[in-house]
Image (cartoon, helix red, strand yellow):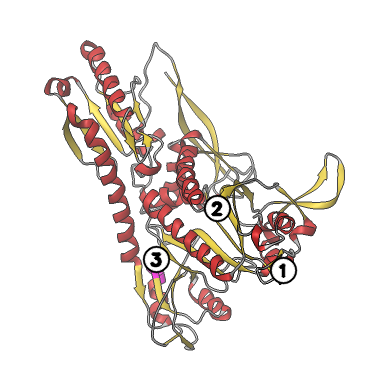
Amino acid sequence: MVTYLNSLLLSDCLGNLFLDAHNEQKTYKLPIHSIRMAFETKEPAKNDLGITVKKSEDFSEWYQQAIIKSELIEYGPVSGCMIIRPYGYAIWEKAQAFFDKEIKKRGIKNAYFPLLIPESLFNKEKEHVAGFSPEVAWVTHGGNSLLPERLGIRPTSETIMYDSYRKWIRSHRDLPILINQWCNIVRWEFKHPVPFLRTREFLWQEGHTAHATSKETQEMVLNIVELYRQLFEDVYAVAVWKGMKSEQEKFAGAVYTTSVETLFPNGKAIQGATSHFLGQNFSKSFDINFLNESGEREYAWQTSWGFSTRSIGMMLGIHGDDKGLIIPPRVAPILVVIVPIIFDNTMDKVLAASRTLQEELSVSTYHGEALSVFIDDSDYKPGWKFNQWELKGVPLRIELGPKDLEKGHAILVRRDTGEKIVVALRDIATSVPKLLDAIQEHLLFKSKKLLEESVVAAIDMKQFSEVINEKKVVFAPFCNNSECEDNIKAATGAKTLNSPLDQKNPVMKCISCGGETRTLFYFGKSY
């Protein structure tokens, strides 16, 4: 008998659900697989576990069901704050491992800075504080005592980190400072939280570097945004647009911001990561200066950059289908699930062969890590197991029954295409890594195709509006004027995403005001 959790309460929040005692509530049923009585096996009702809506018809509901029923997250008691369950956190660890290894190759080291930021520090950079003030959660009391100064819970760490940089930097010999930290962030002011995509608390990395020259600093900015492109495309299998943000959309306090952006199948764009050239703006505010090689006093040049657990939601939303998640092999917590087809008279033989296969695969590696293999020897029927592991997005399933053993083969099933491949048992250990690479490449191919087919060049605002109404992305000349961007957003609901780097275009007319420009931007509705 399977025990069910009958009291998982989810609030509507306009289709983007989080627990909220003030909203109308729904009840969903989820299995607790670890609680099972030996004397009875009960087949769960299909609607209790499977996805009940089509992704193309109701993306928000599909997304919510997929991440809950696959056991990636649980809703926390505070609106906008989610619990990342082990299966979900394992994805984050894979992305972390890739990025952490790469930044260390670049000489960047990890550190940790305090969660609480004194208001006096936060207020030092005026443009920065203006941009983040609405999102800051403040601590005003310690126990029952009023604090002498409010403490902000970090919405980002420039201010707390740069106060230390001021103390550490005296001479050009102290530069560059190359520091990253992995931490949690709290940003409070927004409506309609969506798990992973827009939450009040999230996990991320934030890199902060200080340099002696502008050239070196800008090289770091571009190096990191390219690394983000690699993270999304090579690890998450998510194609992105890499480019420059508009003046209106750049980071508060930055000279300019670069980003990677992508598009969901529902036509909404989303920002994946950003890398900022801060120039000397923060170093002047925090008095971070040094004696240069000429013996003159100069302000340091700085960068900041980050990606977060939002990246997981992006990957899930892009790759999943009506059956549930499809997790790319490079970040999949489980790469292969073996499903033994069990009958009473052949049970021992099939289970023994499954364990042997698991051992053979587990000594193999995939991109430098042990190949993770799970045997589902539970009491559920094979069809139920197939559906459950498809829901959870495991890249590759191996079906092994008594008839397969007699023929000396197993059936391998790809999660991305559903293709069934008969492979001799002796060849499985060499076939599996190749199939996983094929799955990874196919998912990236599909993601690139989506981006390519979703971009339309517009020549006037009438066509611009038509493209946006078709849930696609406009590629058009833009003067990068904030007033112009406000007008476009008011008329169409779209905003700039980014502008490809290193453009060499003739003089064109801005899609909105008709002013001269040489720059093309992507525009779209976004999260």
- Residues 393 and 294: in front is 294
| Residue to which mark 1 is pinned | 284
| Residue 423 as seen in the image, left or right of residue 454 | left
> What residue is shown at x 44% (from left), y 37% (from top)?
69
Label 3 SS? loop
Q: Per the image, is 471 magenta?
A: yes
For disc 3, the marked residue is 471
Q: Position of residue 46 (x, y in %)?
A: 35, 33
Q: Residues within 10 Å of mark 2 (few under 14, many from 20)?
A: many
- Magenta-span inclusion, residue 71: no
How far across and how far down the image is residue 302, in percent?
Answer: 62, 64
Circle nearer the viewer, 2 or 3: 2
Under tag 2, what secondary structure?
loop
Q: Callout 2, which amino acid?
A: Arg
| Residue segment shown in magenta | 468-473
Q: Is residue 60 left or right of residue 157?
A: left
Residue identified by numbered label 2: 198
Locate the N terminus and report the quarter of the image it occupies: top left
